[in-house]
Image: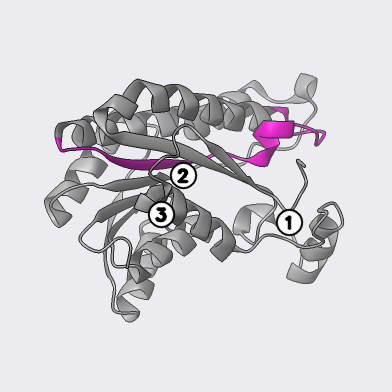
Amino acid sequence: MRFSDRAVLVTGGGTGLGRATALAFAREGASVMVAGRTEEALKETVRLIEAEGGTAAHVRADVTDSADTARMVAETVARFGGLHVAFNNAGAFVPFAPAADLAEDDWRAGLEINATGTFLSMKHEIAHMRAHGGGAIVNMASNIGVHGRRPGLAGYAVAKAAVSALTRAAALDHVGDGIRINAVSPGAADGPMSFQPGESRADRAARLGAAIPLGRLGEAGEIAAAVLWLASDEAGFVVGHDMVIDGGVTA
């Protein structure tokens, strides 16, 4: 129960890795606020947490809007009496296209939700944490931002590399405020963003697993475990780290 008596905010908490991590935090005693744009998905995450005896609530918010992110933090504090941990998971894939063929709107949208959304979330989370004794923040980056070796992913690689760079810079800016900021960079994992249109789970596992030295996709619980460790007191000496979790792809 590493997170008893702690309030945790998870953006993009309605599906995939966000939902899995919200559930993991709740299982370890946290009161969890899940945020995102799709209210029904957020409600389902809350239902799943409460079905296991956990404490959760949801707030509809667009992380690309500063007023929304400020309200998201304020509602977390109002509901649970504080904000101790934030997992900035909200993001979106950028359509596959060679760099010269990538639509300009897709380029901008990828930067907006992945990079700007993380920046705005941190901005308002840090404002509260700095005034109330500190906290821990974990940002969702990607191993694509580390190696960038998959053709057609220039837009996504740049957006996630920006999250990694922002994490390191902000970590040094605010470590003196008692706030530890780190990131995780998963490889292909079992989540909705890894499917191609019409693809079965078995076909996806075969397609992606063949390129992973470990021979399989990552599991949502494995990514969640890394997030929880980085956010916990056990990682108290870890600052500005981007933990790559990809089965050996970037080794």
Asked whether the residues under the numbered discs 2 and 3 touch, taking CB atoms below 8 Å apart as contact, a structural biologist would say: no
Three-letter amino acid code of the residue under disc 2: Ala
Q: In this rendering, would 43 be left or right of 228?
A: left
**Percent coordinates x, y for residue 108 in the rendering:** 56, 24
**What is the crowding at mark 2: few (fewer than 14 residues within 10 Å), some, or many (at least 20)?**
many
Which region of the structure is painted magenta? 132-154
- 147 or 205, nearer to the observer: 147
Alpha carbon of mark 3 to alpha carbon of mark 1: how far? Answer: 21 Å
**What is the crowding at mark 1: few (fewer than 14 residues within 10 Å), some, or many (at least 20)?**
few
Residue 73 picture quarter? top left
Compared with 162, 141 (above or below) is below
Which-is-in-front pick, marks 2 and 3? 2
Quarter of the image that includes the N terminus: bottom left
Compared with 44, 227 (above or below) is above
Q: Earlier in the sequence, mark 1 or mark 2?
A: 2
Element assignment for label 2: loop
Residue 216 picture quarter? bottom right
Q: Earlier in the sequence, mark 3 or mark 1?
A: 3
Q: Which residue is mark 1?
A: 197
**Percent coordinates x, y for residue 51 in the rendering:** 33, 80
Compared with 69, 229 (above or below) is below
**What is the crowding at mark 3: few (fewer than 14 residues within 10 Å), some, or many (at least 20)?**
some
Q: Which residue is mark 3?
A: 38
Q: In this rendering, would 157 be left or right of 150?
A: left
Alpha carbon of mark 2 to alpha carbon of mark 3: how far? Answer: 12 Å
